Image (tube, rainbow, N blue to C red):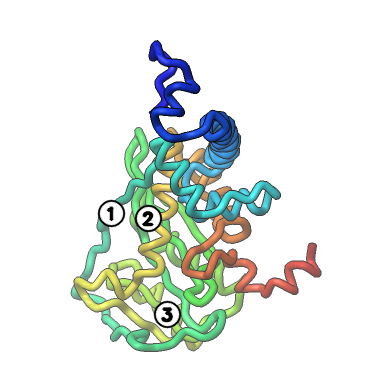
Amino acid sequence: MINHNSELSISRQCKILGKSRSWYYYNAVMNNIRIKRDNKDKAIITEILYKYPQYGYRKVSLESKERGLYIKEKRTRRLMREMGIKAVYPRPKISKVTKADKKYRYILKDMEIRHINQAWSADITYIKLPVGRAYLIAILDIYSRKILSWEISNTMDTQFCINALDKAIKKYGRPEIFNTDQGSQFTSKDFTRILKKNKIKISMCSKGRATDNIYIERVWRTIKYEHIYLNNYETLKELKKGVTDYFKFYNKKRFHQALFYIRPDEIYYGVESLKKAA
């Protein structure tokens, strides 16, 4: 193509290529415009990712639209690729099964979840700290994907799980079904007694089938790669504050791909209810 370092003039090079000089100048101007536009949009993407480093190209595109600076998904993906931005992913396992307590069958198989509080799901994960490990339990409404309650402890006892369950029931009522894995905290008599007292059906994942509790498993991947691994928490107190702030963002602000980019609070409470409250 056109070589600016050539001894031949621009007009001569255009003539050899069978192109007019106006073709060359038009393309030069358009390329300059494209570069400026790309740089402007990359600055917007950088600003969004600085605030929400966990976002992929779809959510970056949606966030840009909310700011009135809409960058289409395909374009966002191309620009992020040019910027060398890509996603990363996880997975540890800590559930301990005991033979002493009663196990319950998995009753969510092939069940269609049609409304809020039809089925809740709970699980425990661990988070490494400089001084040891912290354990996080979260309770999720499967229909809306809303995190209803959570607790953090430095021990794997049953009490912090009971605290999370009590808090969820007091604030949101009781679900029809409560699903967990077969970990000792969830099969314990103290924990199942609360479920039975509130006439909640107990469901437990089959042994070796993590996909039975896939909704809460996705929450762990999300919070770790969007938040925990991006923040070097030193103490349990710092971690609790960070997780609390993140779950507020998760429920109220975060776009959810599985919900067609609607937020969990908008599903759980209804969009119109939220508008009236605002």
With respect to residue 104, does 128 lie above or below?
Answer: above
Q: Residue 163: tell me if it is visible.
A: no
Residue with the mark numbered 1: 91
Residue at the top extreme? Answer: 7
Along the polypeptide, which appears first: circle 2 or circle 3?
A: 3
Disc number lying in front (1 or 3): 1
Residue with the mark numbered 3: 193
Q: Which one is nearer the viewer's eye here, 198 or 223?
A: 223
Q: Quadrant of the N terminus?
A: top left
At label 2, the amino acid type is Arg
Image location (x, y in percent) of residue 102: 27, 81
Instruction: Kindly state the secondary structure of the residue where label 1 is placed.
Output: loop
Q: Is residue 33 left or right of residue 5?
A: right
User: What whole-number distance in Å separates the C-alpha atoms at marks 2 and 1?
Assistant: 7 Å
Q: Which one is nearer the viewer's eye here, 206 or 270?
A: 270
Residue with the mark numbered 2: 221
Q: Which one is nearer the viewer's eye here, 222 or 85?
A: 85
At label 3, the amino acid type is Arg
Residue at x 79% of width, y 62% of height:
278
Category of crowding for the residue at label 2, using alpha-carbon neighbours closer than 10 angstroms: few (below 14), some (14–19), many (at least 20): some
